[in-house]
Image (cartoon, coloured by chain):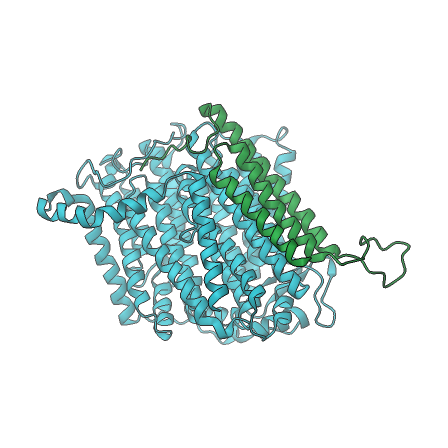
Chain colours: A green, B cyan
Amino acid sequence: MTILVYAVVAWVFAIGIYGAIVSRNLIHLALCLTVTQSSTYILLLAIGYKHGAGAPIFEDVKLGTAAVDPVVQSLTLTDVVVSVTVIALILALALDVHRQSDSIDPDEISTLNR
Amino acid sequence: MSWALPLPVVVPLIAAAVLVATGAILPRRVQDAIGIAAAATATGFALLILAASERHDVLHWFGGWHPHAGLALGISFTADPLGAGMAALACGLDLLVLVYSWTYMRRQSQTFDVLILALGGAMAGFALTGDIFNMFVWFELMGVSAYALAGFMVEELGPLQGAINFAVTNTVGAYMVLMGIALLYARTDALNLAQIGRVLGHRPADRLVIVAFALIVTGLMVRAAIVPFHFWLADAHAASPAPVCALLSGAMVELGIFFIARVYWTAFAAPLHAHASGVRDVLVGLGVATALIGALMCLLQRQLKRLLAYSTISQAGTMLAGIALLDPRSLAGVANLVLAHGLLKGGLFLLCGVILVELRHIDELRVYGAGRRLPWAGVLWLLGTLGLVGLPPLGVFLAQQLLYEGGREHGFGWLAVVGAVASGVCAGAMLRAGARIFLGWGAREDELLSPEPDEHAPERDVSGRPLGIVAGIAIVLGLAASVVPGIEARTELAAERFADTSAYRAAVLHGAAHGDAAAHVSFSLLGVDTASALYGLGALAIAAATAAFGLWHRRLPPRILSAGARTLGPPVTVIRLAHSGIVGDYLLWLSGGALAVAAIWALTL
């Protein structure tokens, strides 16, 4: 079970990066980054998972009831918030690139020529 | 001082929010003044914290969540002299940049001040935090504001491309850091650095801990612009406004290096103790490669900001090699290098803005000889260059002396030669550019240098002189950084405390006073070591030779030139082509490099 989760994490991370490497479209590139980021969610939630435990809500439950780790859940939430900002920024930059050059292909916008 | 610890972070962030909220109401000048006042307050508090941390570590537990019986659940800021010094440097550069932007960025929207303040606050938070997930949040906030600043000139394609390359590579780096943090949390159930260190304890590290270490260090090396993760830096610097470059090069890149040292000494020093040489070899190797490739690429540039950017990469390599020696003496050298280099390089980037304002271009061939009417800028350029090469006893000289001594102790004496060559070649490129611009020496054409798209200069009514004063302040402070009385002894003590894992742990988890030796520190003057002085002069000689070659290489006999082109041409072309400006290529280098580092450590440690 656990090995499978970590294999999924590695796989999702790798396909996200692969998509970003071969991407010819900045919007596609931003979405590949969100795929990569999803692997961090899976990892965080898998680390806090406990078999048979409930949600970490402690109202009206007996003391000592098993619950999954709430810390990794809040880490995941923070990660979502932070990364949404980054993705929004990359999409905004892609929009500006399109305005300037009528293209959103990262290979074509290279102004550098050495 | 505990109450003041969050202020270098909180004050700029609140000011940034105030500027956004009042954007439509207050006139621009009032807004600028609020920003400058906030940055000055933050700098003042950072310096006060630095002074207080000389006696003992300063701690602040947010929300009063103090550790209980040695178990830390809350989030802490922990200021030791090196961390507080980093925060003070970041806040100080932030202040200089805001003052500079008063006229330089006059026509741009107020968003610029907001982003600069957010970047400054995030850098201070990153330097002061004692919690590894909190570090990740500052890492990302620092990143987001920096990406937006790099792409600030949205009406041109160059800045957009630089910002995208910067954002994509650093975001992947941040995900690697986060995965490392998650693995560490899985093993230790802790996010506080001291607590992580205590749980990991002295048991030799297993694969999980090693992979977590590799992920965190690799992610930080993306931000620190270490080969092969460095490509974004030059693109982001070449096209962003000069004051932004000053902040990125002067403080942000160095913070990546700083946290590699922080996380090693607080969490991993004991579990990796048996494998210290394996860690050292890989990091020294990457540092040396970075120093040399950065210097080579620096030599090939004609656009001043890109040239300085590659010099930053080269210096980052030297810093990583210094950290990698894993001893307090080299760490003190790195701390001095960060201080002197941050001020000097910040000042030189601000000077690039002056050149752009006065001469309308920052391409050394386009403004050939045009700088003769700005002799004072030429003098500042020369002073900055001499500071970066470490002319005894100025600028980075003290740092290099400490690094040489640290390297000799570990049998890495040859690092001194690498350092002298790298800083000499970079300084040679800067001398060459300065001689072309301010003296009109050498050839008007140079086929060795990379062509570069032109940058649109700010409005004509901006005067260069007040901007030059701000740049001059930074350069003079950077030159003086080595000769402040007592600074050598102070940084060495601070570095010893930084590397004293168990005392740090006791201070954070049990509130024990950590360090009180500062009372005995004298204000002794810098003792110049003969060997280090010779290395410094050697670097200067290399710089002079490199500059002369750059200016007059066409006068060499054709036979020597063609032989040189045959032997050196192909490898140089390969390295040059690798810096393609295409983000997919950069990601391929990044993932390959990360995989290689993780594999080497996982298989050999």
B400 horizontally vs B69: left or right: left
B553 horizontally vs B323: left or right: left
Give x and y (percent) for residue B191.
65, 61
Give x and y (percent) for residue A10.
58, 52
- At 53% from the left and 57% from the top, the residue drawn is B215
- Which quadrant, please, contains the N terminus of chain B? bottom right
Give x and y (percent) for residue B605.
49, 69
- The answer to which image quadrant residue A63 occupies is bottom right
- The answer to which image quadrant residue B399 occupies is bottom left
Of residue B350 and residue B305, the one placed in the foreground of this image is B305
Of residue B151 and residue B90, the one placed in the foreground of this image is B151
Q: Judge whether residue B32 can be spotted in this image.
A: no
B102 horizontally vs B202: left or right: left
Of residue B459 and residue B469, the one placed in the foreground of this image is B459
Give x and y (percent) for residue B456.
38, 29
Is B507 drawn above or below residue A97 in the view shown?
Answer: below
Of residue B282 and residue A43, the one placed in the foreground of this image is A43
Q: For the image shown, how many numbered marks are present on the structure? A: 0
A105 horizontally vs B207: left or right: left
Q: Judge whether residue B338 can be spotted in this image.
A: yes
